[in-house]
């Protein structure tokens, strides 16, 4: 036991300074990594050419690389054979890479998103069937926030391998309002009424065309589509305003689709009444019919 204690004392006497230097390098290196990360973020944000998501992604990547360099340097200063450690890390990296191939795919997809920029932070997008506003783009996933304040996390590989709809890319978004009117009504008055509602809405873009065209018909009504544009920030408000105002205008004009009338029979449906020539003649010459006709004329 005494010999073991002496060996420990000799070890710290011989390698104590190296261990101390290694600890100093590790502490100072980690502090420098944090400082470099903060300075890099400030520099990239000041240029104004990069969005916040890209800046955070690049800063996090640089921070990880610098920390690995600091750790290897500290271990080498302590007298530890870093070549064998690097070989072990490389071997483990291959095994971990095979086990975490999906996660590494998300990292690669995140890099593609950052540099190709199909979307950026605060864009309103639809990714892999999920719709919302971008709040963060991380190494592994992209975070969306929906209009009902729900957070959705989409893996970056899903974002890259599926269609991406960016509603903010063009600055304006088209509004489509479907209108149903009573069948048999004149087309032009309805189109003029709907068009007047769209032109009176202040949130509708005046720089883009507004159209109202008949889109189809069915057994009970004729259908129209109002198409116009609004700024991204005003899209939902403008659409709601147009929906309500179009309904009010058509209701005042009296051309809304009437409610469907349904006849309900208890038991079997009664047979249709078939009139013969004699019954028709008797019905037309009966006093009750004449009285009823007289009342209608009156």
Image (tube, rainbow, N blue to C red):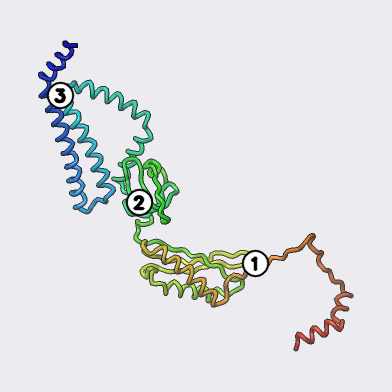
Name the element at disc 2.
strand
Q: Residue furthest bottom?
A: 298
Callout 3 crowding tier (Cα within 10 Å): few <14, some 14–19, many ≥20: some
Residue visible at 56% across and 67% down in the picture: 180
Quote the CA–CA distance across marks 3 and 2.
Answer: 45 Å
Task: Determine contact: label 3, label 1, CB under 8 Å.
Answer: no
Q: Is residue 242 left or right of residue 219?
A: left
Q: Which residue is mark 1?
A: 260
Above or below, 294 against 31 in this view is: below
Residue at the far front in the pictured view? 2
Instruction: Specify the quadrant of the image occupied by residue 107.
Output: top left
Image quadrant where one finds the C terminus: bottom right
| Residue 26, horizontal then vertical, whole percent | 17, 32
Nearer mark to the viewer, of 3 and 1: 3
Disc 3 secondary structure class: loop
Q: CA distance from mark 2 to mark 1?
A: 44 Å
What residue is pinned by disc 2?
134
Residue found at x 16% / y 28%: 74
Crowdedness near tag 2: few (<14), some (14–19) or many (≥20) residues, C-alpha within 10 Å: many
Residue at 21% from the left image edge and 47% from the top image edge: 41
State if disc 1 and disc 2 touch (CB < 8 Å): no
What label sits on residue 28 in the rendered view? none
Label drawn at residue 78: 3
Residue 236 position (above or below residue 290): above
Task: Tell me residue 49's x, y (percent).
Answer: 23, 52
């Amino acid at each position: 036991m005494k010999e073991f204690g002496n060996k420990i004392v000799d070890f710290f006497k011989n390698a104590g300074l190296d261990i101390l230097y290694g600890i100093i390098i590790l502490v100072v290196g980690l502090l420098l990594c944090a400082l470099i990360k903060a300075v890099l973020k400030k520099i990239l944000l000041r240029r104004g050419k990069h969005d916040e998501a890209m800046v955070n992604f690049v800063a996090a990547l640089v921070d990880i690389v610098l920390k690995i360099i600091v750790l290897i340097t500290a271990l080498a200063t302590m007298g530890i054979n870093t070549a064998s450690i690097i070989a072990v890390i490389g071997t483990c990296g291959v095994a971990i890479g095979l086990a975490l191939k999906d996660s590494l795919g998300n990292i690669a997809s995140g890099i593609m998103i950052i540099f190709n920029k199909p979307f950026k932070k605060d864009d309103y997008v639809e990714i892999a069937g999920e719709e919302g506003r971008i709040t963060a783009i991380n190494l592994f996933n992209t975070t969306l926030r929906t209009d009902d304040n729900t957070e959705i996390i989409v893996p970056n590989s899903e974002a890259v391998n599926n269609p991406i709809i960016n509603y903010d890319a063009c600055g304006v978004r088209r509004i489509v309002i479907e209108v149903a009117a009573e069948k048999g009504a004149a087309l032009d008055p309805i189109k003029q009424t709907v068009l007047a509602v769209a032109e009176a809405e202040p949130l509708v873009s005046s720089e883009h065309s507004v159209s109202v065209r008949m889109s189809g018909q069915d057994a009970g009504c004729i259908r129209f589509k109002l198409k116009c544009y609004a700024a991204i920030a005003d899209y939902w408000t403008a659409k709601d305003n147009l929906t309500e105002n179009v309904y009010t205008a058509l209701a005042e004009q009296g051309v809304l689709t009437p409610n469907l009338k349904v006849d309900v029979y208890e038991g079997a449906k009664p047979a249709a009444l078939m009139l013969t020539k004699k019954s028709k003649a008797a019905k037309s010459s009966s006093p009750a019919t004449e009285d009823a006709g007289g009342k209608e004329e009156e």
